[in-house]
Amino acid sequence: MSDITVPSWRAQPAHPGPNWRMLAVAGGLLGTLAMAGAVYWGISRMGPRTVPLIEPDARPVKIRPEAPGGLVVPNQDQLVLEPPSVRRAAERNAASARLDQGPEVPALDQLRQQAAPPAPPPAAAPPAPPMAPSALVAPAPLPAPVAARPAAPATPTQPAPVQPAPATVAAAAPAKPGIAPVAGGRAMVQLAALTSEESARGEWERLQHRVPELAAFQPVITRFDRGEGQAPLYRLRTGGLANAAAARTLCAAVQAKAAPCTPIGG
């Protein structure tokens, strides 16, 4: 046998490799598409967004039932024990009767008669008194004429003194003594103890609107140091009262409006 020469253009590799050029082109296209999608998504997110509008439900809240009277019993209008012809005739008559009847209207006259109270029985006429038997009575003799006596002079009658009716005077309740500051008054009342001066002034304004008796007073706010490590307190007081009794009276008026009050000094 002689060797046969095979042309080079017919020779093919046993294991052809991947086409790197096509892969690079496809990867570039995919990357470009991904970049374009990312840019579009970012631009869409940056634009103005519409606010969702909450609207009421357009569906009806209540739906009229098909049978307002209650449960519908099947075959309630059918004559089961009758022949079919009789049942059909009865169904036709019942359907025509239901169509002919108008809407049910209450009988107002009958309802008024039932609700009206019963009429009282007629009062019986009183019986006539029995007639007394007539008797013949002799006429009484006329009295003898009497000589007229001279009339006595009329004495003037004095009218009885009219006594005035006792006037009903309602006892006036003792007026409540006025609560006001006086010159040189040393008695005071404490209304609150708060953690800041602003809170104390706000509490004073609130109490003035709530308790009218405090309108003539001025607030006295003093700082009180409780010790190391504790926040100071600001006492809200007012004073200028004459004595301890006036302080207790003012505290009673403040406590009547459900506000704390403590009399101090006298």
Image (cartoon, rainbow, N blue to C red):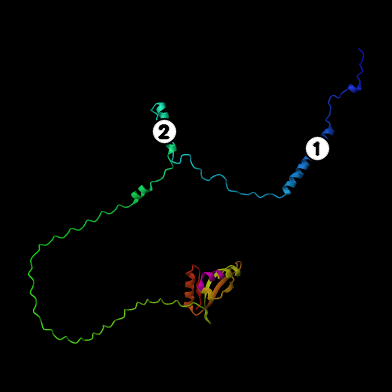
Horizontally, residue 161 falls left or right of residue 82, namely: left
Residue 22 at what x, y percent from top left?
83, 33
Q: In which quarter of the image is the N terminus?
A: top right
Residue 5 at what x, y percent from top left?
92, 18
In this view, 206 is above or below 93? below
Using the rendered image of the protein, determine whether residue 226 is visible from the camera's viewpoint: no
Residue 174 at what x, y percent from top left?
42, 77
Residue 230 at what x, y percent from top left?
60, 67
Tell me, for residue 63, which label it has, or none. Answer: none
Can you tell which of label 1 and label 2 is closer to the viewer? 2
Using the rendered image of the protein, determine whether residue 190 is visible from the camera's viewpoint: yes
In front of the other: 70 or 241: 70
Label 1 crowd (10 A; few <14 / some 14-19 / many >=20):
few
Q: Mark 1 points at which residue?
A: 29
Stretch of the chain drawn in magenta: 205-212
Label 2 crowd (10 A; few <14 / some 14-19 / many >=20):
few
| Circle 2: residue type | Asn
- The CA span between labels 1 and 2 is 82 Å
Q: Name the residue under label 2.
A: 93
Q: Do the residues labelled 1 and 2 touch (CB within 8 Å)?
A: no
Q: Residue at x 90, y 23 (%)?
A: 9
Is 75 contained in the magenta span?
no
